[in-house]
Image: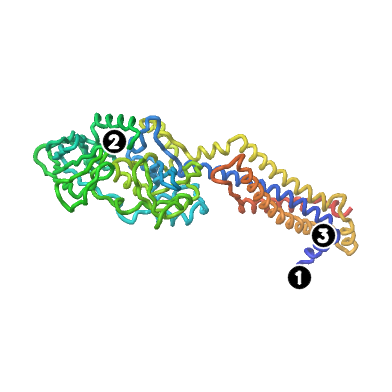
Amino acid sequence: MARGGPVLTRLALVNLARSPWLPALAIAFLAVAVGLGGFALAYRSTLIRSAADQAADRVPLDALVSPGPDFRTPLELAPLQRWQALAVGPVLPIRRTEANYASGGGTVTVPALGVPADGLIDIHGWRASDGSAALTVLARRIEPTGPVRVPGPMLPVGARWLSLRASSPGFAVDVLADLRDPQGTIRQVAFGTAGPGVAFLRAAVPPGRWELAALELDEPTGVAITNGHQNGENPAAATQSHTRVALGPLLALPVRGGSLLRVPLGAWRGVGAAATTAPVRSGAVAMVGFDASGTPGVLRPAQPADTRPVPVLADPGTAASAGPGGRIALTVDGLPVIARVVGVLSRFPALPSDPAGLVIADEPTLAAALDAQLPGQGRADELWIGTGHLAGLRAALRSGALGQLDSSFRVDIDHQLRDAPVARGVLGTLIAATALSVLLAVVGLLAALLGGARDERIGSDLKEQGVGPRGLRAELRVRLALASLLGVIVGLGIAVLLTRLAVASVRGAGAVADPRPPVVTVVPWAALTVWSLGTFTVLMLAGWLVPRGSVVR
């Protein structure tokens, strides 16, 4: 390959080959030194990446805000708009809960998360190998294809009373109205008790803009205690009483003047402990079957969740338990939810390492499905926040009402992992090894090619053929450059190999230390390139500074 090249290059190659054992030793020494330094750089980058991955696995965005000791959620203390103003970035409402499903004659419980589908691509700590498809594809699969909730009637501005005609021949039933404000918060107002006779019940409407989300039927306190006592002592099946409750017409009444709203309840559906016959398109009265089973009955407008399953991402075990079309019957917070598995995940950030599995759904879709069973049950209970103004967010979370919330910051966890004594010791050792390898490379190569064991015939032969001191130094420098180049190239290969072997050893010792997510090999090609060029430059500089008298003795 060098036949058509410069004379100095051909001379340097010939002279390296005249006594191959010594140049080979020099190149091997240089390769090991460069490999040691390159490994130090690569493994340091691998450890830093592992710390960042572990931090992102616990806090997927920049901050995670959850309820404090009093269990009040972030959205109960401040509306979403205020959080968005504080963050100046994405704020994802999250519903964290558990889901149960039947499998193999038993019940499996897995952690479940409701995460806005359009926010999945913003989270950190995700790897392509974690899912059956790219994250953008999985996000589109759980996006709702239409409205996730049908709102109830809006009460007229100025409405102060709700009037409801009600009767319950079997036993007394407490009737409440579930009102939803523009922020999605549910507030209950009591109508009173429906008994055997027809009664017109009234409930006061608090000031504000309200949507009538549902009517709720409950056992009176005394009946609930009696049934609970009987069921606790009775070894047989739970005692239940049944009655048929007539509800309607329902009117929203202003204090004086104003508009009057009539709500046709005949088209509403009963869920939970309440059951309705086939709903009609209109009708002022709803006939509701109610079971005194210790759980409330809900009468509300028909919702998409009644006929459309919730698309979810699940672990392989949960996905395998799904039926035809991926459908699976889940129980979330004790409420039935029909879901459809549309993608498979091996892990997901912010969830514990749980061999039982996981379920991920779009937060608005999951919230609507839970609210359809029990209004208010789907309310988000934590926030994932991305921000470019971390100091301002920290300050807000340390003062006022927000100070009672628990918060975690990804950057803090990252620093804690990097500043751990073992991590500092390992990183410091690797940095020292990198610096030492440069010195070893220079000393080793110069000692091999310029030391006492060098082949003096090379210089003598060139001198006898009329090559002067300048030519001798130039040939030596080219020979040094060729040996350095080969040693650096081989050293890079050694560095990558050592890094992969080290990461494999860490994975093999998973019984002792098993970071989550697992460690992945990071080869910082930019840093290794700079390192290789720097080492090569130092070697060339050392060769250039070779004293004149050391060329030929």
Q: What residue sits right under mark 1 in the picture? A: 4
Residue at 20%, 51% in the rendered image: 279
Q: What element carries label 1?
A: loop
Q: What residue sits right under mark 2 in the picture? A: 239
Identify the mark at residue 465; answer none if there is no mark. none
Residue at 83%, 52% in the rendered image: 450
Q: What element carries label 2?
A: loop
Q: Which of 326 and 9 is in front in this view?
A: 326
Q: Which of 328 and 45 is in front in this view?
A: 328
Q: Is mark 3 on a helix, strand or loop?
A: helix
Q: Where is residue 293 in the image (x, y as percent from the top left)?
A: 28, 37
Q: What residue sits right under mark 3 in the picture? A: 16
Q: For the residues carrying marks 3 and 2, which lies nearer the camera in this image?
A: 2
In the image, taking residue 114 as reference, residue 266 lies left or right, namely left
Q: Give the amino acid type for the residue marked by disc 1 in the picture.
A: Gly
First of labels 1, 3 by sequence position: 1
Q: Give the amino acid type for the residue marked by disc 2 in the picture.
A: Thr
Q: Gap between marks 3 and 2, in whole Å?
A: 97 Å
In the image, taking residue 461 as reference, residue 264 lies left or right, namely left
| Residue 206 in view | no
Q: Give the amino acid type for the residue marked by disc 3 in the picture.
A: Leu
Q: Which residue lies furthest to the left in this view?
A: 257
